[in-house]
Image (cartoon, grey):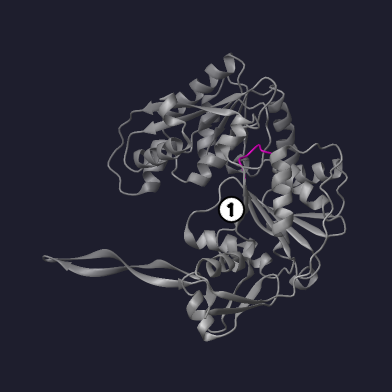
Amino acid sequence: MHKVVKIKKLDAVHCKIMDKESENLLLPVLSYKSYRHFIKKVRYGSRVVKRHFKTPYVQKLYDGRNKIFLTGFVPRIKEYCTQNEYQLDYISYDINVQPEPPQVTGIDFRDYQKDIILSSVEKKRGFVKAPTGSGKTTIFLGIISCFPAFSVLILCDKVSLLNQLKEEAVKRKINNCEFSTIQSFVNRDPNDYSDYFDMVIVDECHHLSGMKTMYAKVLEKMLAEYRYGFTATPPKEKAKKYALEGLIGPMIAEFTEKEAIEKKVISKPKLTLESVEFDLPYMRKYVDFYEQGIINNIKRNKRIIRIAKRRNRIGKTCLIMVKEIQHGENLLELANNLNCKFIRGETKSDTREKIKLAFNDKNIMTIIATAVWKEGIDIPTLDVVINAIGGKSEIQTLQMIGRGSRVTEDKTQFEIVDFLDSCKYLAEHSIERMKIYNKKGWLTKNV
């Protein structure tokens, strides 16, 4: 006799485990192993020192008292029950809406785009993993076109990206959408939107990185049945990954970077590594190493500007990415003979747009930019991305590099310039970035 798992869908956000037996059966699929970190004073010889410890524990993906879990986990439960030959008794009120064929004014969908659209429409919720430059705006306009009677909300985290999306929707005569930054929307009264939207789309959904984020606060209050996210870099940490899956859904389609390069959808990257040798005084804190080894490192900064000048001389545009405003100002001060602008958070949106257009037309040859240009900026003609930030985050590194991946008639390859820093912490971070490049297959061939 088959064991029976009983769950009930309460709404688009929450489901409930119906009995104790079902809870016991679902615990392996609705939990994961995690660790609690703590510091304890211990005696070491004649001294008392602080030591870091961690203890394992089981983190549940449901409310143990009320037996409530996020609806985005239903697909994993279905798969788990099938694998273990459990009978699933799933009480759901789902109503099937007959979609129309995807059709957007002025767009002829590529085969992979149409496949992603149809898969997304069929599965109703989940996220799409696709590299920067693969036409995600086209894809989610295609999804929206299948449901012309729906009220749709599109959320992102940057005004510049929001404006790009809005302009494209107007151009393509998609008029059933509301656009908002998450920073603005999170301040709205949930009573005004909880049951208003039929579909919600989250661009750059890797920012939904936990249950305390602004995206989580909104999506937990929203009853839209159709939920989609788009990202080139889904989170890998378990807590972040499960927040994304629970509130939006699992990965429902993937268009790989390799496929995109083969189909000439994005440019092929060429990696250039620059070795930077320098001596720093003894320091303990990472922030001090970063300040002296990156932000105020004259030797390294001069190297960055020389690289940009060489590329500019042969007609190539350069985007220099920095983390701190002071670093950007230091580089700008050295760029005295460079056709260069510095974009930061305080730069007005209309000024950013003018600079972006001039940069794309190659009337400006080099841009220094903080995180405001790390993602969501479309500059098809960009030739070189210079990682002046350093760092070890895979999401940050790949999002930054993605600015150069667009294809044009005159461009089939772009260059990534990165640095092999030689001091504590910074060298470790360089190694982590090399691991990222190696995993992508860019390191062996170009070094």
Kindly identify the amino acid type of the residue bearing the numbered disc 1: His
- Where in the figure is residue 348, as x and y percent of width and height? 71, 41
Judge by depth and name the residue closer to the eye, 29 or 104.
Answer: 29
Residue, disc 1: 206
Q: Residues within 10 Å of mark 1 (few under 14, many from 20)?
A: many
Work out whether 305 lies above or below 251: above
Label 1 residue SS: helix
Identify which residue is drawn at 79% across, 63% down.
198
Judge by depth and name the residue closer to the eye, 296 or 109.
Answer: 109
In magenta, the rendered stretch is: 130-135
- Whether residue 302 is in magenta: the answer is no
78 with respect to 84 (left or right): right
- Residue furthest to the front: 1
Residue 150 image-quadrant placement:
bottom right
- Where in the figure is residue 400, as x and y percent of width and height? 56, 39
294 with respect to 250 (left or right): left
User: How many marks can you see?
Assistant: 1
Identify which residue is drawn at 81% across, 42% down.
167
- Where in the figure is residue 361, as x and y percent of width and height? 72, 24
Identify which residue is drawn at 66% across, 69% down.
220
Residue 415 image-quadrant placement:
top right
Residue 401 image-quadrant placement:
top right
Considering the whole magenta stretch, tell me its main secondary structure.
loop
Work out whether 56 lies above or below 382: below
